[in-house]
Amino acid sequence: MASPRERMVVSAALLIRERGAHRTAIADVLEHSGAPRGSAYHYFPGGRTQLLCEAVDYAADYVARRIADAADGVALLDGLVGFYRDQLTSTEFRAGCPVVAVSVEAGDPAKPQETEPVIERAAAAFRRWTELIAQRLAADGVDADRAGELAALITSSIEGAIVVARATRDTAPLDVVHHQLRALLRGAKPKGRNRR
């Protein structure tokens, strides 16, 4: 069973993906997680900023594991798109990616110490995912430079499609991105490799 601290981090990530960071208060996280009221500052002495950073790290780790577990690049793509499609439809398009949610919020320019650490964590998550995808594609036999470009395209395209799908309340943008990226990945594999 997860500790109150772990439940709070997961709850924060889940709430951020639906509400964004600005609208995710510690009181909401406590209620969602069922953690004791006095536990927030015990577990997160750095306050809300620390909690948000750890929620972004949790989301980053979760997606990184999905990427690392993929058998090949096409399976990786299919798995990520399927996961996000399920999240969108099961929440009536409320849930997107918590890393994107914190990335698009400009924050309070008068309090950069509260927002900059969270944005830095989001940037690190995107870099990590892109590097893992590039490694997977290179392991499939894609040239290293091409793998890096495709990985950046995959990360950016999926995340952008999630944003558009949420706004339009339609999975069509994600489906189009999936179809087009799948075709690119099949074309990027060296001849003689198994094509799925």
Image: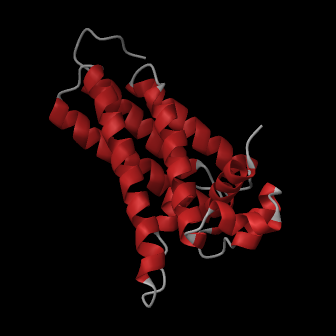
Left or right of residue 196: residue 16: right
Location of residue 128 with respect to 132 vertically, above or below: below
Q: Residue at x 53, y 31 (%)?
A: 79
On the image, the x and y values in percent for residue 126 come to: 38, 51
Asked if residue 195 shows in the view, the reply is yes
Q: How many marks?
A: 0
Location of residue 112 with respect to 97 vertically, above or below: below
Looking at the figure, which quarter contains the C terminus?
A: top left
Location of residue 102 with respect to 81 vertically, above or below: below
On the image, the x and y values in percent for residue 172 come to: 57, 49
Q: Residue at x 40, y 39 (%)?
A: 180
Instruction: Please tell me in which quadrant of the rendered image residue 160 appears.
Output: bottom left
Looking at the figure, which quarter contains the N terminus?
A: top right
Q: Residue at x 70, y 70 (%)?
A: 26
Left or right of residue 12: residue 27: right
On the image, the x and y values in percent for residue 143 come to: 17, 27
Left or right of residue 135: residue 156: right
Asked if residue 106 shows in the view, the reply is no
On the image, the x and y values in percent for residue 134 come to: 29, 35
User: How was the colour assigned to the protein in this rendering?
Assistant: secondary structure
Location of residue 61 with respect to 14 vertically, above or below: above
Instruction: Please tell me in which quadrant of the rendered image residue 52 appears.
Output: bottom right
Q: Residue at x 46, y 53 (%)?
A: 159
